[in-house]
Image: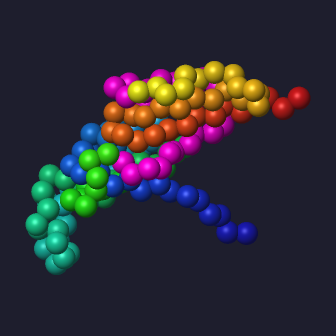
């Protein structure tokens, strides 16, 4: 059976590099980035964009996120929420805390009525996150 995964791709307007570096510092993994200045001249429209902006960035590890800068992006992320889910309470709590730095916690991590520990936040780049720490099955 083939493996399928969902890989979020976030479009930024000039702040992809600091956003992806921030996500790497919180989530870990390997970060690769390619600026528009590195794009061959034959790529349509590449030379008209700020050459310091990122054409593509990929953070790969336990979590995979990709992104790029584009003039068409809104100043904040479009309405989408990224959800981190798992059983490693220590690691997910640390990720929640890290992602909230400079952002806004909308619901602190706490034990919820369904038994899991859950919280929500908007990071300093306008991306919304949910973290759900699955309770141990009894």
| Coloring basis for residues | rainbow
Q: In which quarter of the view is residue 92 placed?
A: top right
Q: Is residue 99 magenta?
A: yes
Q: Residue placed at 17% from the left, 68% from the top?
A: 46
Q: Is residue 81 magenta?
A: yes
Residue 107: image location, x then y, percent:
54, 26
Question: Is residue 116 found left or right of 10 in the rendered image?
Answer: right
The image shows residue 104, relative to residue 32, as above or below, that is above
Question: Is residue 133 found left or right of 129 in the rendered image?
Answer: right
| Residue 117 appearing in the image | yes
Question: Outermost residue toward the right?
Answer: 138
Question: Is residue 3 found left or right of 15 in the rendered image?
Answer: right
Q: Nearer the viewer, residue 34 or 50?
A: 50
The image shows residue 121, relative to residue 20, as above or below, that is above
Q: Residue placed at 66% from the left, 31% from the top?
A: 133
The image shows residue 104, relative to residue 47, as above or below, that is above
The residue stretch that appears in magenta: 77-103
Residue 15: image location, x then y, percent:
24, 45
Residue 135: image location, x then y, percent:
75, 29
Residue 56: image location, x then y, percent:
31, 58
Q: Residue placed at 26% from the left, 47% from the top?
A: 75
Q: Residue placed at 76% from the left, 31% from the top?
A: 114
Q: Quadrant of the N terminus?
A: bottom right
Q: Quadrant of the C terminus?
A: top right
The image shows residue 126, relative to residue 95, as above or below, that is below
């Amino acid at each position: 059976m083939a493996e399928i995964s969902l890989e979020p791709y976030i479009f930024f307007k000039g702040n992809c590099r600091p956003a992806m570096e921030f996500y790497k510092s919180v989530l870990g993994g390997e970060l690769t980035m390619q600026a528009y200045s590195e794009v061959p001249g034959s790529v349509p429209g590449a030379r008209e964009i700020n050459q310091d902006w990122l054409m593509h960035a990929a953070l790969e590890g336990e979590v995979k996120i990709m992104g790029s800068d584009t003039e068409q992006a809104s100043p904040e992320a479009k309405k989408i929420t990224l959800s981190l889910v798992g059983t490693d309470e220590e690691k997910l709590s640390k990720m929640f805390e890290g992602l909230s730095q400079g952002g806004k916690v909308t619901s602190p991590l706490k034990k919820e009525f369904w038994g899991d520990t859950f919280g929500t936040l908007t990071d300093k780049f306008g991306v919304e996150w949910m973290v759900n720490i699955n309770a141990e099955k009894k």
